[in-house]
Amino acid sequence: MLARTRGAVTRIVPPWMLVLAGGVAYAVATSSGAPGVAAPVWSLAAIALAWLACALGVGGWVAVALAGAVGALASAALLGPGFPLAHDLSLHVWTMESFARAVAAGDWNPRWHASVGLGTPLGLFYPPLPFWPAVPLRALGLAPAAIAKASLIALHAAAAASMAGAALHAGRGARAAL
């Protein structure tokens, strides 16, 4: 993997490429041959658009907005029927519903979620900010599953945009942001 050139050691293969190749080899070795979730075309197009924006030198708040769009498109699996497999997704669906019910009843920071089973102290373990997008969506009359999907897509977009903004604020530029 290493070669000597005029006394200095240079790398033929960068370390990140070895890690990536190892991850791909592990995924291929442990898969059944059929992908679990096919990559949607719009998701791949958003990633290509982000790379194009980097190549063209797009920066500033355009990079933050583009990162938010890519974050929203990354959750494209939520746009289809049903939910993707996740060990605790049903808990979060009903926690969002319970949070929205409690806020509608006047409790602005519910610590005890009485609508989940016999009740649970989820407000002590999870911060309330991720559950706030569910409040206006429930007021619109959406079903709990639709509320969870829309909230998760919005939170993915906000997470990507905030990380891009942090990268720009740290002086890392649009390439680091995207």
Image: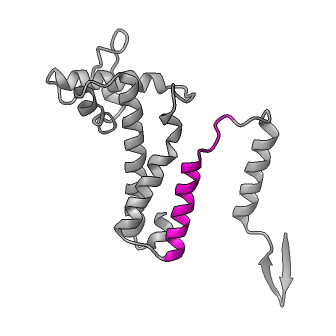
Image quadrant assignment for residue 138: top left
Is 2 placed left or right of 67 in the picture? right
Quadrant location of the N terminus in the rendered image = bottom right
Q: Residue furthest bottom?
A: 6
Q: Residue furthest top?
A: 118
Is 60 placed above or below 46 here?
A: below
Q: Residue at x 76, y 55 (%)?
A: 21
Asked if the magenta segment contains residue 98, the reply would be no
- Magenta extent: 36-56
Is 1 placed above or below 103 here?
A: below
Q: Residue at x 46, y 50 (%)?
A: 71
Image quadrant assignment for residue 147: top left
Q: Tell me residue 24's x, y (percent).
A: 75, 49
Q: Tell me residue 153's x, y (percent).
A: 42, 41
Asked if the magenta segment contains residue 43, the reply would be yes
Q: Tell me residue 3's x, y (percent).
A: 85, 78
Q: Residue at x 33, y 13 (%)?
A: 119
Instruction: Give the prevailing secondary structure in the magenta stretch.
Output: helix
Between residues 72 and 13, which one lies in front from this camera angle? 72
